[in-house]
Amino acid sequence: MWPRLERRAEASARMRVLSPLIAVTLTIIGGLAVFALLGKNPLSAFTIFFINPVHDLYGVSELLLKATPLMLIGVGLAIGYRANVWNIGAEGQFILGAVFASGVALQLPESASRWWALPVLALAGAIGGGLWAAIPAFLRTRFRTNEILVSLMLVYIAQFVASWLVYGPWKDPQGFNFPQTRLFADAALFPVLVEGTRLNAAFMLALATLLGAYVFMQRSFHGFQMQVAGQTEHAARYAGFSAARTVWAGLLAGGTMAGLAGMSEVAGPMGQLTAQISTGYGFAAIIVAFVGRLHPLGIFFASLLMALLYLGGEQAQQHLNLPASISNVFQGMLLFFLLASDLFITYRLRWATPNFGRRAWMPR
């Protein structure tokens, strides 16, 4: 008996829901195997990696803090991915959003008030990320270039721009030669939500964005247009939906949300622009979007999971003497198992007897 993949008559709605859960379970099992291969006690390592980060109020607040930019970026990417617009450069758009917001924050007068300074910074961050996403949108609609490659290559340019600024014109003269800007004024910082923690009002902004994205994707005509364009391109053309408008909307949605996430970092836990602004959130949010099934509610929970992997990597570095990049191993396994599980949305596994004489498969 040999296993054989058989195409389903229609996609399985049950597997679409179960696939992320299966991927998470297999990732945990794979993680236990990795810890064992590294000579660590699997159960002890599991506790350190997954339980320790959230064992108290401060840990939970750090989880929500880490999840905030992932929510913002992930929901922006999901809008484009639903329309088959593949923005892979959210990391660069995140950086440019942080750069634009930092430029405004550094120019704020001392008399600035938080009630108008923060909206201006948010607008600047969204514009920065949106402008960076507009480059692949223009090239795609005007010259039919591949938005995957263009948006990805722009990530490295964005990193060089940010590095040049913090090593050059924006470098803090009193920063002991560290590549960073001066600290922002209080008016340019989000207020803290829970005293004694770093969790700030950007988390509430992320929740509001998820709600707004739900209304757009599930309850608006333009969201319906983009979903139709992603599922059946020919039907969208027949209905008169503009393909170019879909590309622009998909990329700008991802860019502005990534830029807003960059602003939330420099105006939140960092309080300044540094050379370490590139944290990998833009790439991790791609996994978040797909684990969350391109749905705002799913993205909320997927962001918490991905944030836990980040915190678990830090705990593993402190208590297990492992590199913090162990979290990247878990992210990679999660993506791998998700792609493998997604195969069974459109296919089912059958057992068949091969007939080598006629070179045909005989299903059981």
Image (spheres, rainbow, N blue to C red):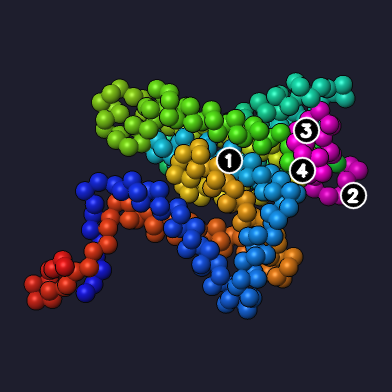
Residue 325 image offset from top left, x and y in percent: 64, 62
* Earlier residue among tags 1 and 3: 1
Instruction: Determine which residue is flagged by label 1.
Output: 71
Q: Quadrant of residue 231?
A: top left
Three-letter residue code for mark 4: Arg
Q: Distance between the residues labelled 2 and 3?
A: 27 Å
* Earlier residue among tags 2 and 4: 2
Q: Distance between the residues labelled 3 and 4?
A: 9 Å
Q: How far apart are marks 1 and 3 (CA)?
A: 19 Å
Mark sitting on residue 176: 2
Circle 3: element type = loop
Residue closest to the eye, 157 or 18: 18
Instruction: Determine which residue is flagged by label 3.
Output: 191
Horizontal side of residue 155 vs 165, given as left or right: left
* Earlier residue among tags 4 and 1: 1
Q: How far apart are marks 2 and 4 (CA)?
A: 25 Å
Residues tagged 2 and 3 counted as in contact (Cβ below 8 A) = no
Q: Which residue is drawn at 52% across and 42% down?
A: 299
Per the rendered image, the range of residues in magenta is: 173-197
* Earlier residue among tags 2 and 3: 2
Residue 301, compared with residue 24, is above or below; it is above
Q: Which residue is drawn at 57% across and 46% down?
A: 303
Residue 269 image offset from top left, x and y in percent: 75, 42
Residues tagged 1 and 3 counted as in contact (Cβ below 8 A) = no
Disc 4 crowd, CA 10 A, few/some/many (<14, 14-19, 20+)? some
Given this view, does label 2 or label 3 mark the residue nearer the observer?
A: 3
Instruction: Determine which residue is flagged by label 4.
Output: 198
Q: In which quarter of the image is the N terminus?
A: bottom left
Q: Quadrant of residue 198?
A: top right
Three-letter residue code for mark 2: Phe
194 drawn magenta: yes
